[in-house]
Image (spheres, grey):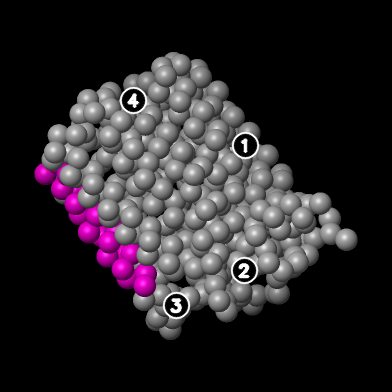
Amino acid sequence: MTHPVTDAYQGITGAEEEVRDREARNGLRHMVSLSMTKVADGLIDPKLVLSWLAGALGAPAALTGLLVPIREAGALLPQIVFAGWVQSLRHRKWAWVIGSAGQGIAALAIVFIALTLEGFAAGLALCAALALLAVARAACSVSNKDILGKTVGKTRRGAVTGVAGSVASVAVIVFAVLLMSGVLRDVMPVIVAITFAAAMWGTSAFVFSGLEETASADTEDASVDFSLLKKDRQFRLFIAVRGLLTVTALAPPYFVLLGGGQSALQGLGALLLASAASAFAGSYVWGRLSDTSSRRVLFLSGVLAAVFAALAVFAELSGWTGTAWVIPVILFFFMLSYQGVRSARSVYLVDMSPEDARSSYAALANTAIGVLLLIAGAFGGVLALAGPVASLIGFAVLSLAGGLLALRLDEVEKG
């Protein structure tokens, strides 16, 4: 007789074979913990919440502009350093627990800054606190794929992460609606939201600490194996595909610049709402599809991103973007393709990586992507000198190239 938890887990993941009770318990812990961290991510989003908070505190625009690059690159580049440490741990869950707790502490630091500082000092302190948060996130990211691979079976990993994305998006949608309605125009409600985010990270660390993880074998050489880049052609190809598809993360702010009829706060609120709604609609579906073929999801997501970026360009040139609903609708579907990229890239990397080298694969891939992200961001910034339309055209081309290149990847879910 199966346990109710196991029955629920099998129903959520669509497992065709019977799974062990231990995996079911672990899978649900993953879902709960990841849901809470994704809620926290949405409540402290540097593109919206922290940028608005920095402006409200009188921070210089130059410091406010550093927030997104600090968050994105800071969460990826340190992973090459953390990978060896993670591989040296017999129970890798503690790296994730420390990282989640660290993000909570950084969020509390942001609350303290908002209550006590103003102007240049506030902007500088926010950048420092966000850097701490990003580094803590790097510890979670480099360990998560390894832990997921050890505790959740292949063909069920996408569903686990997809459920977390969809559940968390509901809370972020509520926050976005409040923001767009004008309710959250004062600093204090935003501070309360960030405090709640800190609590979510702390609670998720506690929940994840109960994961039933089998001890890994002792590792004499815990350093990252850089030769993987030379030896594994599919790994290099995967990095190229993921690198091209990073533009799906960089393009959304350029959508907000189209039309020009909304205030900055309303436009960014629409961005957050579109992102959360697309996560709710697509995370679980993309996760299940990735369990079948993450390679095909990468292809489809890249093509769809290119289509909707091109559609946004067409709408701008046709004068349709003056209509209030046009850009939010197009943006929703573009962000839906971004959710597909997020789901598939994670599942593909876990499924393709040997069990004893997942941390090295994750660290090498994420460090390479951190560099490519900066390059792609600079590329978009140069094109932006000619306007957002030029940037979106460039991003559409790169998305299409990434989707088509994904067809050359091996199928890894069948083995």
Q: Secondary structure at mark 1?
A: helix
The magenta stretch spans which residues?
386-407
Pointer 3 with pointer 2, Cβ within 8 A: no
Amino acid bearing label 2:
Lys
Which disc is residue 266 wearing?
A: 4
- For disc 1, the marked residue is 200
What secondary structure characterizes most of the magenta part?
A: helix
Pointer 1 with pointer 3, Cβ within 8 A: no
- For disc 3, the marked residue is 410
Q: Is residue 180 visible?
A: yes
Amino acid bearing label 1:
Met
Q: Secondary structure at mark 2?
A: loop
Pointer 1 with pointer 4, Cβ within 8 A: no
Q: Position of residue 257 (x, y in %)?
A: 23, 35
Examine the rendered structure and indicate whether residue 179 appears above or below residue 216. above
Q: Nearer the viewer, residue 248 or 336?
A: 336
Q: CA distance from mark 4 to mark 3?
A: 43 Å
Q: CA distance from mark 2 to mark 1?
A: 28 Å
Q: Earlier in the sequence, mark 1 or mark 3?
A: 1
Q: CA distance from mark 1 to mark 4?
A: 26 Å
Q: Residue at x 32, y 59 (%)?
A: 303
Examine the rendered structure and indicate whether residue 47 appears above or below residue 72. above
Q: Earlier in the sequence, mark 4 or mark 3?
A: 4
Q: Position of residue 79 (x, y in %)?
A: 49, 60
Examine the rendered structure and indicate whether residue 357 appears above or below residue 160. below
Q: Residue at x 62, y 37 (%)?
A: 200
Pointer 4 with pointer 3, Cβ within 8 A: no
